[in-house]
Image (cartoon, rainbow, N blue to C red):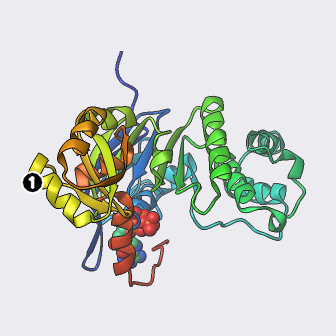
Amino acid sequence: MSEPAPAISVTGLKKTYGQVEAVKDVNFTVAPGEVFGFLGPNGAGKTTTIGMLCTLVAPTGGTALVAGRDVVRERDEVRRNIGLVFQDSTLDLYLSAEQNLRFHAELYGVPRPQVGPRIQQVMEMVALWDRKDSKVLTFSGGMKRRLEIARGLLHSPRVLFLDEPTVGLDPQTRAAIWGYIHKLRRAEDITIFMTTHYMDEAEYCDRIAIIDHGEIVVVDSPEALKASVGKDRVRISTEDSEAAIDALEKRFGLTAAVHEGEVMFSVPAGEEFVPRLFAELGLPIRSVSVSRPSLDDVFMSYTGVTIRDAEFEKSATKTWARTTGRR
Ligand SMILES: Nc1ncnc2c1ncn2[C@@H]1O[C@H](COP(=O)(O)OP(=O)(O)OP(=O)(O)O)[C@@H](O)[C@H]1O
């Protein structure tokens, strides 16, 4: 039997803004039914990529097919087949939750007899049916995001795009949003493409692409990526971090760096290394922790920096006034 056609297929996709190469020659495919995540620090090119896939940003080069349609030549067809949940809310705060959805149903030409039942179905999925008559103005940030997810699903899209779906929400609400995304995945025949800079959220995806400086550095399942690191992360706290870094280099040939106030390095079989560390480092150690590779370690092993440090670097240099480039 032949493979089903990909839900998203991207070849040599590029976007430049003046001198800035926001997205450089990106290639990937997403299978139907997959939850595919784009993980990278702020400014890595995630929003630009999602914008091109959603037909909101014109590519500078390359091609992208979404639900089998070309994002440039078949823009309307692509739009009919996708749902969007973006970082900036576009809900009408002065309308009720249900009115917002009715308006969207009309915009997308959902057949009249289907509108009522479909609204109920999607609102129940995100547990907002009992609040359908409330003005959106009275909703919390998490409720608004849930309503946007319901709205994105209303016209039964083949692909749902979520740009940082949980940004700005507290951890409990973020977990709840993920609960809804998983429920939705079981209930609807849909492909989900999302961007995030939260490592823990990328864990929920079937596959992730790590993106940095406009380029995909690796694509695989979170488990395979973590297994590929093959080393544990060791963090130590000492009185003199610089002296500890020197000693690690001289005595063990290890490259260490300071992250968030602690000296950090990677070794295979971290626990077995700890007794040697105490015996041979030659400096007093206040505390040691060993952890299995996380996606942050994956990010670091491919880019040389932690995602947080990469974000700091970006925010320090981000001076341009951002526009979305929407048409
Ligand atoms: N409209 C624009 N005009 C000029 N430069 C832009 C524009 N949009 C994005 N950029 C630049 O393109 C690069 C990628 O930005 P993009 O917003 O795609 O990153 P991101 O990974 O989505 O980050 P964030 O999570 O902060 O949105 C950045 O260097 C940014 O400065």
User: How many numbered marks have been drawn onto this rendered protein structure?
Assistant: 1
Q: Classify 205 as above or below 235.
A: above
The structure residue drawn at horizontal position 47% and vertical position 35%, both measured from the top left corner, is 34
Q: Residues within 10 Å of mark 1 (few under 14, many from 20)?
A: few
Instruction: From the top left corner, tell me how far across and down residue 167 is, in percent.
Output: 57, 60
Instruction: From the top left corner, tell me how far across and down residue 308 is, in percent.
Output: 39, 62
Farthest-out residue, top: 1
Q: Classify 227 as above or below 264.
A: above
Q: Is residue 129 left or right of residue 320?
A: right
State the residue in front, 244 or 204: 244
* Quadrant field for ligand 1: bottom left
Q: Quadrant of the N terminus?
A: top left
The structure residue drawn at horizontal position 78% and vertical position 69%, both measured from the top left corner, is 93
Does residue 257 appear in this view?
A: yes
Report which residue position mark 1 lands on. Answer: 250
The structure residue drawn at horizontal position 62% and vertical position 52%, both measured from the top left corner, is 171
Q: Secondary structure at mark 1?
A: helix
Instruction: From the top left corner, tell me how far across and down residue 65 is, in percent.
Output: 38, 47
The image quadrant that residue 303 belongs to is bottom left
The image quadrant that residue 260 belongs to is bottom left
Does residue 58 appear in this view?
A: no
The structure residue drawn at horizontal position 74% and vertical position 44%, both measured from the top left corner, is 126
Q: Is residue 3 left or right of residue 303?
A: right
Q: Is residue 182 left or right of residue 317?
A: right
> Type of residue at label 1?
Lys
Q: Is residue 184 left or right of residue 144?
A: left
